[in-house]
């Protein structure tokens, strides 16, 4: 469903993403795991077409990503950033249906989809007409997720979607996110530095160090059989901290 072939990115002569080749199957949840500055978010932004690779090719659902195809590809994907990225002057409802209105969905279709997503994410219906500043952190993330899922994307990209939330809210949202992944059937690429999130969501994990994949496989394999000293120290630092 998603393929990256020898993709690279540099800024001011510094390599951010070294030659990267990845294949993500339809319906798979791939977690990009690693510390800050390892290239996770840059990879996600290249897949979303927000950053242009220095070299290599990205293919989404068989279509190579380019200036000519990016608009079409973006209709196939949903994108959730840290802290939601909601428009503060729009209500929760208006944020959620924004892209559907842009592409010309009829009101009845939007209402049906909104009801489905409110139920899926356990969002309180009476909060739909509140503005982002009137919502809790967990509610804002649910709005962001509903907005990303609204057009029924085949590919869902999430950048530290739970990173700014307190532990109790995060635990509830982890459950709801996993339900949303299962019910939507979307292919998911999720960026995190958190081992718990990786263990909760991942079908497969890619650990990154300085723009390179240093280990790839099931979560249990990453933890039980780290492939390098870096991976071992990264895992142990979180185990000790917890």
Image: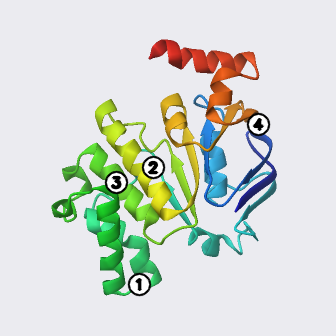
Q: Quickly name the residue at label 2.
A: 178
**Distance in Å between CA atoms under marks 1 and 2:** 27 Å
Q: Nearer the viewer, residue 58 or 200?
A: 200
**Distance in Å between CA atoms under marks 3 and 2:** 13 Å
Q: Earlier in the sequence, mark 2 or mark 4?
A: 4
Counting from the top left corner in percent of width and height, residue 129 is at 19, 65
Would you say the residues marked 1 and 3 are in contact, meaning their CB atoms lie under 8 Å apart?
Answer: no
Residue placed furthest toward the top: 240
Residue at 60% over, 20% down: 235
Name the side, left or right, on which 27 lies relative to 112.
right
Which quadrant of the view contains residue 94? Answer: bottom left
Q: Quickly name the residue at label 4.
A: 15
Q: Nearer the viewer, residue 198 or 182?
A: 182
Which quadrant of the view contains residue 165? Answer: top left
Q: Quickly name the residue at label 1.
A: 105
Q: Secondary structure at mark 2?
A: helix
Q: Secondary structure at mark 3?
A: helix
- Quadrant holding the C terminus: top left
Q: Earlier in the sequence, mark 1 or mark 2?
A: 1
Name the side, left or right, on which 161 lies relative to 75.
left
Would you say the residues marked 3 and 2 are in contact, meaning their CB atoms lie under 8 Å apart?
Answer: no
Q: Earlier in the sequence, mark 1 or mark 4?
A: 4
Residue at 29% over, 63% down: 118
């Amino acid at each position: 469903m998603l393929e990256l072939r020898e993709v690279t990115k540099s800024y001011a002569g510094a390599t951010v993403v070294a030659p990267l080749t990845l294949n993500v199957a339809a319906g798979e949840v791939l977690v990009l795991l690693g510390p800050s500055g390892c290239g996770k978010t840059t990879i996600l932004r290249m897949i979303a077409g927000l950053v242009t690779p220095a070299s290599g090719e990205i293919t989404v659902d068989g279509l190579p990503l380019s200036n000519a195809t990016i608009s079409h590809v973006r209709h196939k994907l949903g994108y959730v950033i840290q802290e939601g990225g909601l428009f503060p002057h729009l209500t929760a409802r208006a944020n959620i249906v924004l892209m559907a209105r842009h592409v010309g969905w009829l009101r009845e279709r939007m209402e049906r989809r909104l009801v489905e997503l409110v139920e899926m994410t356990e969002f309180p219906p009476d909060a739909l007409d509140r503005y982002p500043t009137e919502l809790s952190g967990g509610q804002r993330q649910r709005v962001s997720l509903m907005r990303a899922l609204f057009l029924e994307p085949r590919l869902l990209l999430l950048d530290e979607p739970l990173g700014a939330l307190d532990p109790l809210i995060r635990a509830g949202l982890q459950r709801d996110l996993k339900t949303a992944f299962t019910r939507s059937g979307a292919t998911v690429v999720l960026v995190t530095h958190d081992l718990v999130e990786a263990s909760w969501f991942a079908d497969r994990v890619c650990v990154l160090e300085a723009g390179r994949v240093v280990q790839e496989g099931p979560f249990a394999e990453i933890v039980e059989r780290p492939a390098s000293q870096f991976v071992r120290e990264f895992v142990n630092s979180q185990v000790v901290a917890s």
